[in-house]
Image (spheres, helix red, strand yellow):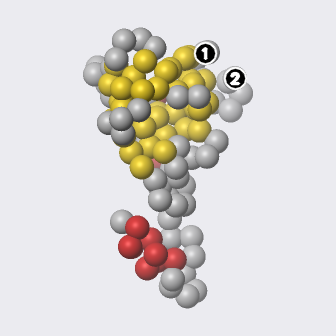
């Protein structure tokens, strides 16, 4: 994947080939279970499984890494990258996972 990004980046006259992940383009059930951090990292919940996919970095703008995280006894999650991360939820909109703040994609701009 990185090879293709480098090839696309090297093309003269072609820019903005990638588009940002827009909440309105996701189905409602995915928006409800997806949070995004300020740096573009994503936290996506699995319906009915109690786990998350953590994507660190913005995959559209630069290289990123994804890990699967499973419940290791609330509030701790064990992730496939070998790390353990703690979750806290302050309200409907905001979650903190591994010390990083995430905002729910389905939340309206007025919700805080």
Tell me if residue 100 comes above or below residue 19 in the rendering: above
User: Residue 95 location in percent, x, y?
Assistant: 56, 24
Q: Secondary structure at mark 2?
A: loop
Q: Nearer the viewer, residue 85 or 6?
A: 85
Q: Earlier in the sequence, mark 2 or mark 1?
A: 1
Q: Which residue is mark 1?
A: 91
Q: Residue at x 61, y 46 (%)?
A: 39
Report crowding for label 1: few under 14, some 14 to 19, many 20 or more residues within 10 A (C-alpha).
few
Q: Residue at x 55, y 88 (%)?
A: 12
Q: For the view shown, which residue lies furthest in the bottom direction?
A: 12
Asked whether the beta carbons under mark 2 and mark 1 sit within 8 Å of each other, the answer is yes
Tell me if residue 93 comes above or below residue 17 in the rendering: above
Q: Residue at x 52, y 52 (%)?
A: 58
Q: Quadrant of the N terminus?
A: bottom left
User: Residue 50 location in percent, x, y?
Assistant: 33, 20
Residue 13 numbered tag: none
Q: Secondary structure at mark 1?
A: loop
Q: CA distance from mark 2 to mark 1?
A: 8 Å
Q: Which residue is mark 2?
A: 112
Tell me if residue 27 comes above or below residue 95 in the rendering: below
User: Residue 83 location in percent, x, y?
Assistant: 41, 32
């Amino acid at each position: 994947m990185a090879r293709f990004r480098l090839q696309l980046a090297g093309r003269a006259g072609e820019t903005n080939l990638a588009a940002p992940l827009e909440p309105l383009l996701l189905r409602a059930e995915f928006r409800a279970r997806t949070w995004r951090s300020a740096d573009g990292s994503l936290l996506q919940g699995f319906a009915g499984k109690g786990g998350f996919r953590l994507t660190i970095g913005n995959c559209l703008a630069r290289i990123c890494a994804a890990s699967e995280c499973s419940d290791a006894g609330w509030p701790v999650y064990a992730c496939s990258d070998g790390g353990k991360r703690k979750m806290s939820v302050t309200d409907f909109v905001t979650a903190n996972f591994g010390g990083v703040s995430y905002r729910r994609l389905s939340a309206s701009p007025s919700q805080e």
